[in-house]
Image (cartoon, rainbow, N blue to C red):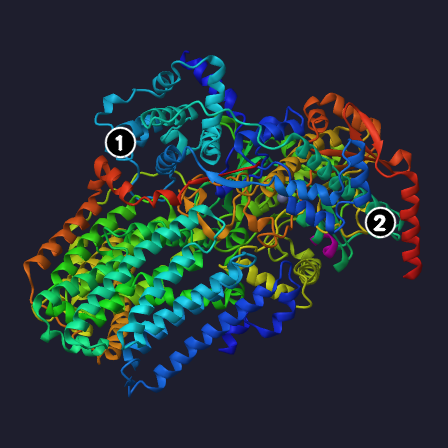
Amino acid sequence: MNSQHLNNSINEVSRAIGRTWPLYSFVTSNPLSGYEKSAFGEALEKAGKLLKANILPDVSLFRQAWESGDINNEALIDNLAENGFFESPELCLELFENHSKKEIENEYHQVDLIMAKWLAAFMDEGLAEWQMPGRKKGFYKAWRDLARYDNDFNVSRTSDIPETSAQAIEESLHGFSRDEYSRIFMSHLAALPGWTGYIKHRVEANTSWQQNFPISLQDYLGVRFWICKHLNLQILPLDLKTSGNRRIAEMQLIWLKTWEQTWQKTLVQTLKKSNSSKTKQKKKPDAQLVFCIDTRSELIRRHVEAAGNYETYGYAGFFGIAMDYTDLKDGMLRKSCPPIVESAYKVSEIPQKNRETDALQLQKKNQVSGFQDYFLTRMKNMLPSAFGYVEGTGVLYGVSMLARTLTPGFLYRKSSGRRFQQESLCETDMIKNSTNRGLQMISLEEKAGIVRSAFNLMGWKEFAPLVVFAGHGSHTANNAFGSSLDCGACAASPGRNNARMIAKLANLKEVRELLAAEYNILIPGNTVFVGAEHNTTTDEIELFDAQVPESHFEQLENLKKNLRRARETATRDRLRTKDKGVQLSDIKANNWSETRPEWGLAKNAGFIIGPRELTKNSNLDSRCFLHSYNWESDKEGTALEGIMQGPMVVTQWINNHYYFSSVDNEVFGGDSKITHNITGRFGVVKGNGGDLKMGLPLQSLNKTDTEMYHQPLRLSVLIQAPEKRISDILLRNENLKQLLDNEWIYLLVMDPTEENRVKRYSRNMDWQPVIEKAEVNAAKSTISEMELVN
Amino acid sequence: MKEKTASDPLMDPDNYAELKSRPGYSGSVFGARIFSIFLWTLFVGNLFILLISMNDLPDWSNGIFLFNGFSLLIWLTVSFFSAVTSSYALNYLHGFTGHSRFNWLSLGFTASVMLLVVSDHIIPFLLSWLLMGVFMAGLIGVNSKWGEARQAAGYAQRIFLAGSVLLALGILLPAFKLNMFTVTGLIAATEELPYYIAFTSAVCIITAAIIQSAIYPFHRWLLSAMTAPTPASALMHAGFVNGSGIILAIFSTMIIASDTLNILFIIGGLTAVISQFTKLLQVNVKQKLACSTIAQMGFMIMQCGLGFFNAAVVHLILHGFYKAYLFLSAGEEVKYSSPSAPLIIRIKPVQAVMVSIFSIAGAFLFALVTGKGMTLDSGIFLTLIVAITVGQATYNIVKQRILSNTQKLYIPVLIFVMGIGIYALIYNGVTYLMAGMPMVNVPLSLSWIQIGFGIIFLAGFFMMKLGAYRNVSWLYVKLMNASQPYKKSVLMYKSRSL
Ligand SMILES: [Zn+2]
């Protein structure tokens, strides 16, 4: 086997392993994305066997859903019978119970332990002051140079170990047949899926750490095989017995489907009900606010709309600007658009007019605080200052500990003035993300195009005097998973800088002129665009209004006042409290002992693409992504196609991530936060060490260790548009059709040309009604009864 | 107190109804609140007693129990740490199935420490030492459904048991010889013991002490204890590992009579240096903190070895604050960064002069306010540490470009005056509270061993400064392996669906 061939076959096999993202940019992606070309059920079986993981909800989740009626009992019995299962639901649950996971001893304990030790040391991103020697040479060579000092195994001379990882692999595979190779590769990559997933991430993203200290799956396998051989461990795993019982798995899949169908019916009924109570005559809104499609926006939009005469929209939270962003604070470049999109622009901060000195001052302050961090680390690390340092500062640590424990809310409010200094002194500035320096300017057409496509996709009609683009970010303390709560459309960064950027573009006079002249988008002269951030932990909406003209001050003040009111009602609603919502949310944002500062995207189950009128009158309980779309103004279907190619795929990633993290929190998730141990500044391990954790922690999914909060359901996408238009789009986009055919997501269409009847897509363009006629009538009658009561 | 607690939603009774309506509320939250309120009350009560008895320290004993300034000091300390961790755990462990087990174990642990420092009779004394270990091991394995946690707990328990047996030997031996069964009686009568008994007893007590403090070669249990939830770790590093400081302070006369101070000094010193280097290569936050704790405990044992048992007690309290804080905030270490080469630092002559002047000034201030290092004795060693620390702080500040020249002048002064001032306050307070104890502040004459370690510390300091250790591969691997957790507490189990 030559090295190219070896490399290819490893890459081929590695598709079975997910990608582990670093916690500082925690992208919620499908850990089984490598299987998306197969049907859901089939993929589950393969992956479950390989990773020894649960791939369908645990029996306790099914029980909770069934007992609460989230799995409709009659439908369940029908569905089971239809597939030839005549067991009662109770009996099913009992059967499932007998097949739940058990703890067994790890036969590869020795080698797993050694690998985890070296991988953690090699891939460290600056936690250790004393780094593994020789990292520049790459993982295999660095390890080889050190191996003879490692008393976990005996090797006296470095020359006893093959010089390259390819040689090591070749030696170890000697005597095995080609067919066995991939089984061997697969099982050893799957032995530590978190770590191998992170190797995959480093290689694919080619991070600066990877450029300096390269590692590859081949290196990993080389080291691992050599150690196995040296410890006399069999590298060909015992035949993977068909773990799990196929019959049980089939039944569980039916349970899952029934659960999903029950939810779909509820959704459709809610929307029908909402639609039937038509909204009153509209007058021109005082302001319009654009939020991310994020499920958390659904709640705040309801409350903003209730607080005044406002219109809200849903749009992917990167606002259509595929950019990387450089923070003034640390100078690091972060991706700020969906991971599936290539970044076309670089955005950075420049001082606002007449604020140059203040901005300089701020920069100086940042440097001083950077020096402080460095200084403290130095003092703690050095001999013997570490001892003197502890004695001199111990009391201060004691006092801070007391303050942080007892007064987190107070401290949070006190620091509010310092939170957005950068945004009030600087503005965003955009250049082309290209290596060719000459082409860094962005043409007017391009700028106008970004603004235009936003209004196009959302089906915008008229402009209010204030239009707010609100990105979102989460404020939490002591939270390794903080970035998992930020915007999924911005690669786990807060979306405020994208919001500021698009507001700035839309405010440009020449952009408006071009939009009016060429695209008939008429933005009135008195319309001002403002960037903002929706803080999802506290539901505060911070407007970045430093450059709003004086003419709009009054309207701005009014809006701010109403947003404060919206915050009060929204937190009350979300935190289920009578009148302390604001106070509680401040505490949650800054409490270092809070493992559930907010729920993120938990409970997500639906994605609604359509105008706000469709959802405006219903409480969707933060379970749906909402994208504004107007089928009437999108005759060609190009806007819809864009939404389906972009946002729909992102929501599928998020949804699948939540699904798998819930069904097996140990393997696909992050396990419980309470024993997390941060490793290498990019990840966590549990307790004393072991495999890197790859998904969301238990506390982001469950109310308690046993009680679920997120329901593991596949995403149901509902689009209001003619069926024909959607079918055409699917025919043009094989990858989207594949996702649907393989049942990774559901698609429902609400056809406005057919009285908004809802149909569900099933394999090969077959459309099935979701609710039978009779049921719709029944639903209608209950609504009219309710109205009577009201 | 009311004012402080009011902003903690879980401490505020008005908020109770809301708490109940939160998702995931269960009865255990109510139970946990009771624990927390009890511990805060305990702390405030101790503080109150301290304040009213400031001029007339308690000194009471009935032959089985006693209560003096030292008991009060430790009660105050341990109730503070327990109260803080219980408040923290209230939120942090919400929904954890072992939450109420955690509460009982923490409470049990707190009670055993409190019992230890009020025990005069050796039976409650030994029993409370044993119980401390039992409860702490329980906390390590509080998640009993997790195989690795059970392994780690079992490992710790075995070591703690060995420690308890050694302590029992070390106390029972002189007790039966002298036919004296109170701790105060024993430590007052050490002079009467034959040397071989005093020596054996001291060695047993020292070993028991360093087991608890995870001093080399007994450090591995601490590096395997991350299966405990974070607040339990905070309690462990602030209240359990430093048990050795307490016990050595109590048995100071035995150590002095048996002439084993140098053993303490050497073991402590070696541990301090090795662990401080080991800490540098840790890639997991909690392991890094554990190595730092081991180094700090090493230093504390050194202070005992110098005859400054009171300084050791001060160190254990201040280190408790420091380490508990770092554990409770251990989730803050995720950071996006790019590789950077270690800085190479050159210092100008003027700056070097400044560093020296400030170091000497710092040392002088320290000597002035703590009374150490004024004469030629072991106190010089501690003063030297202070001087180097001040020097290092100054050094890091003066070479910074972003600071102005005036800032470079006043910031180091501000820092060291404040640091030394606060330290002196605590030091003198603790010394005052420990005044009733025999021989806790006995400077030794300066010895070659001390000078030797002074030189080792300086050498270590320069090695670190120059980064000379970075390319010593064999040392890297040896230290890495020495700091690995107990094998069976990592990746020992897999799960499999049937
Ligand atoms: Zn978003």
Across and down, in percent, residue A269 comes to: 84, 45
In the displayed structure image, the side of residue B32 where residue B110 appears, left or right: left
**Magenta span includes A577:** no
Disc sitting over residue B182 in the figure: none
* SS class, disc 1: helix
**Residue B251 falls in image quadrant:** bottom left
* SS class, disc 2: helix
Ligand 1 lies in which image quarter?
A: top right
Q: Is mark 2 within 8 Å of ligand 1?
A: no
Which stretch is magenta? A300-304
Which chain is disc 2 placed on?
Answer: A
Which chain is disc 1 placed on?
Answer: A
Q: Give the position of the C terminus of chain A as an image quadrant.
A: bottom right
> Could you tell me which residue is drawn at 73 percent across and 47 percent down?
A66
Disc sitting over residue A146 in the figure: 1
**Residue B473 falls in image quadrant:** top left
The residue tagged 2 is A274
Across and down, in percent, residue B89 comes to: 49, 62
**Magenta span includes A301:** yes
Amino acid at the residue labelled 1: Leu
Q: Residue furthest bottom?
A: B56
Across and down, in percent, residue A625 comes to: 70, 43
Q: Is residue B181 above or below residue A564?
A: below
Q: CA distance from mark 1 to mark 2?
A: 67 Å
